[in-house]
Image: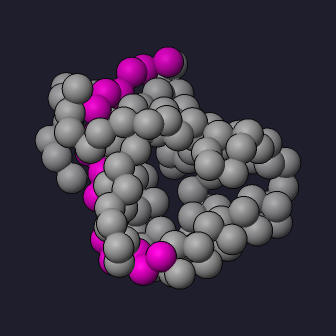
Amino acid sequence: MQPLPQQHPSATALTSLLNDYSAAFLALDANMIAKLYRLPCAIVDADGTQVFQDYNSLHAKFAANCVQLQQLGVSLVQFQIVAINTLSDTQACMHVAWRVFLAEANIDFRTLYICHQQKQQWQIFSANVYPGAFTAI
């Protein structure tokens, strides 16, 4: 993880959320990944645009992603927070650069996250994956 471009009031908590997220993906733990999302939630990625109303469908999506990552030989996941913007006291927007190390190659991409804080815990409300380099803007 790289230093944040600017100190955001919730930067430490949001970084912790991403640390948990990357650890869950590296562990191929669909249950842990799904628990980091609040429901309902939306995800736009290589699987298309999906809205999840219940935990079981969200878990199934990440279970399939974990199988694919295992087949590709995932060995490391790194992230760099490019920007954090406050939307409200309990909502934030993050642009995050990702690098996923696989057996044959690395995959670099970026994700726009909308995160909500509920009961003193940050969770992902929406994730929109888009092309982008791992380096900072």
The spot of residue 27 in percent (x, y) is 45, 79
**Is 126 on the left or on the right of 83, as rendered?**
right
* Residue in the image at 53% along x and 81% along y: 71
Residue located farthest toward the left when viewing the structure as drawn: 3
Q: Quadrant of residue 26?
A: bottom left
Q: Main secondary structure of the magenta part?
A: strand
In the image, farthest residue toward the front: 104
Q: Is residue 79 left or right of residue 32?
A: left
The magenta region covers 72-87
Residue 79: say if magenta.
yes
| Residue 78 in view in this figure | yes
Q: Residue at x 51, y 73 (%)?
A: 69
Q: Is residue 78 above or below residue 134?
A: below
Image color mode: one colour
Residue 88 in the magenta stretch? The answer is no
Tell me which residue sits at (51%, 80%) in the image: 70
Answer with left or right where residue 42 lies relative to residue 129.
Answer: right
Residue 19 percent coordinates (x, y)? 35, 59
The C terminus sits in image quarter: top left
Q: Position of residue 24 (x, y in %)?
A: 47, 70
Q: Nearer the viewer, residue 26 or 87?
A: 26
User: Number of labelled discs?
Assistant: 0
Tell me: 15 left or right of 57: left
Q: Residue at 35%, 27% (x, y): give it.
A: 84
24 in relation to 83, above or below: below
In the image, residue 112 sits, relative to residue 24, either above or below, namely above
> Can residue 117 be seen in the rendering of this structure?
no
